[in-house]
Amino acid sequence: MDLIDSKYIGLISSRLQKFKRVKNDLYNFRCCFCGDSHRNKNKARGYLYSVKNNTNFKCHNCGASLSFNNFLKDMDSTLHKQYSLEKFKEGYTGKNFVVETPTFEFSKPNFIKKINLPKASSNNVAKEYLENRKLNPERFYFAEKFQEWVNTQKQTFNNIIKDESRIIIPLYTFSGELYGFQGRALNKNSIKYITIILDDSIPKLYGLNTVNPNETVYIVEGPFDSEFVKNGIAMCGAWCRC
């Protein structure tokens, strides 16, 4: 399955009831169009599966059948725009994926000077999690309602009914301006990291504001890991760019 499709299936999975990965390139959940079954809440007859270079949706209850491109468009128009842009950048075309050339509008980014949230140390669960990992809770923030707060910074989520709390990991430029952030889930059943980028022109890296480029720079996978590496930075583009 295409990596971009896999990424956006992961992004939308929290909204799909009884979602599970059956095997590579096959996902199962309750159909979001027909509801699957009102009498049996355990019925799950909706599937996302790979066909050549495309990903399709099929419900074996109502018979709904459409490409993942159209499925995502029905589920979340904002997320679909991001998906379309990524597919366009990679040059994807085909009968199951048709996208108009996106219009690019460039304007000077308005950086947030600071995060208007309490420190992670203000929440017992977040504080305990960070301290157990030998991290300083004062270096991170806490959002009681992550999706609601994100929308105050950048309109990202259309449906925030299933909102949740998350630890906020700030992403700063070399000059110390905030250009994005990651939300780290505290619920084990949620997607672990959600990354929100406010300016795509800046590399998706954690620790730019503290790294010394004139010395050896060590690149690790996660922001928390980089806290234990001298002159270390971390990649932040693996999960979600919204």
Image (cartoon, rainbow, N blue to C red):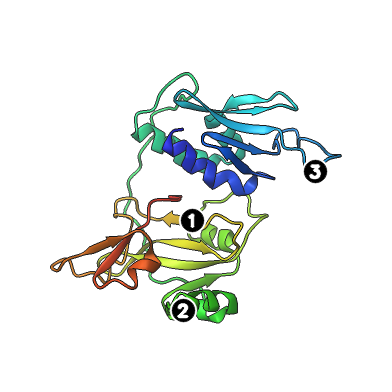
Label 2 vs label 3, nearer the camera: 3
Q: Position of residue 83 (x, y in %)?
A: 46, 38
Q: Is residue 119 visible?
A: no
Q: Residue at x 52, y 74 (%)?
A: 129
Q: Which residue is mark 2?
A: 137
Mark 2 closeness class: few <14, some 14–19, many ≥20 residues within 10 Å? many
Residue sitting nearer the eye, 106 or 66? 66
Q: Position of residue 104 (x, y in %)?
A: 35, 39
- Residue type pointed to by label 3: Lys
Q: Residue at x 44, y 27 (%)?
A: 99
- Residue type pointed to by label 1: Ile
Judged left or right of residue 43, residue 66 is: left
Query: Residue 16 appears in which quarter of the rendering?
Result: top right
**Residue 141 drawn above or below residue 53:** below
Considering every residue shown, the one lying at the far front of the view is 23
**Which mark is first along the chain, 3 or 2?**
3
Q: CA distance from mark 2 to mark 3?
A: 40 Å
Q: Which residue is mark 3?
A: 41
**Residue 148 drawn above or below residue 211:** above
Label 3 vs label 1, nearer the camera: 3
Q: Residue 194 bears which disc, if any?
A: 1
Mark 1 closeness class: few <14, some 14–19, many ≥20 residues within 10 Å? many
Q: CA distance from mark 3 to mark 1?
A: 29 Å
Residue sitting nearer the eye, 176 or 8? 8
Q: Position of residue 162 (x, y in %)?
A: 66, 55
Tag 2 and tag 3, C-beta contact below 8 Å: no
